[in-house]
Image: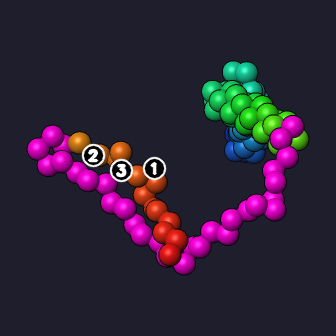
Amino acid sequence: MRAIIQANDRPDSEALIRSSLGNSFDKAWVKLVDNPATGVMAGTLYMARQIEGSLAATIEQSVEQSVEQPVDQSVEQPVDQSVEQRVEPSVDQNAGSVDWSHADSTIQRITP
């Protein structure tokens, strides 16, 4: 008799166990993934901290330099952005190399 009752309750018991184990697994998985020292994203998070630290130091240095050397804005020259000429790099077909020495940028501004 008891075996018949347990057989009828088996699907419910299995569902309860699956739910409990699933929740426990999800919590453990999130804990492992989100761990900044050993998780899946640990390398990416480390690199992000290094980049952010480097950027913060660079910004701090540029702010210190701008405070030490104020810019004289009365001599500012207007930039004519109406005329642009695109400069294409020259490619040597024989050597397979690109010569970029003729331009600092691929866009040169020409003032008339």
The answer, for residue 33, to whether it is visible in the render is no
Q: Is residue 106 left or right of residue 88?
A: right
Q: Which residue is mark 1?
A: 104
Name the amino acid, label 2.
Answer: Val
Marks 1,3: beta carbons within 8 A: no
Q: Is residue 10 above or below residue 32?
A: below
**Is residue 80 found inside the magenta-colored segment of the image?**
yes
- Tell me the tag on residue 16: none
**How many other residues sit within 10 Å of disc 2, few (<14), some (14-19) or many (≥20)?**
few
Name the amino acid, label 1.
Answer: Asp
Q: In the orientation shown, which residue stands out farthest toward the front? A: 75
Please name the residue shown 73% across and 21% down the image. 37
Please name the residue shown 72% across and 43% down the image. 15
Q: Quadrant of the N terminus?
A: top right
x%, y% of residue 67?
Answer: 88, 41
- Looking at the image, is mark 2 or mark 1 nearer the viewer? 1
Highlighted range, magenta = 68-96
**Is residue 92 found inside the magenta-colored segment of the image?**
yes
Label 2 residue SS? strand
Q: Is residue 37 above or below residue 10?
A: above
Please name the residue shown 59% across and 73% down the image. 80
- Tell me the tag on residue 98: 2
Q: In the orientation shown, which residue stands out farthest toward the left? A: 94
Count the labels in the image: 3
Label 1 residue SS? loop
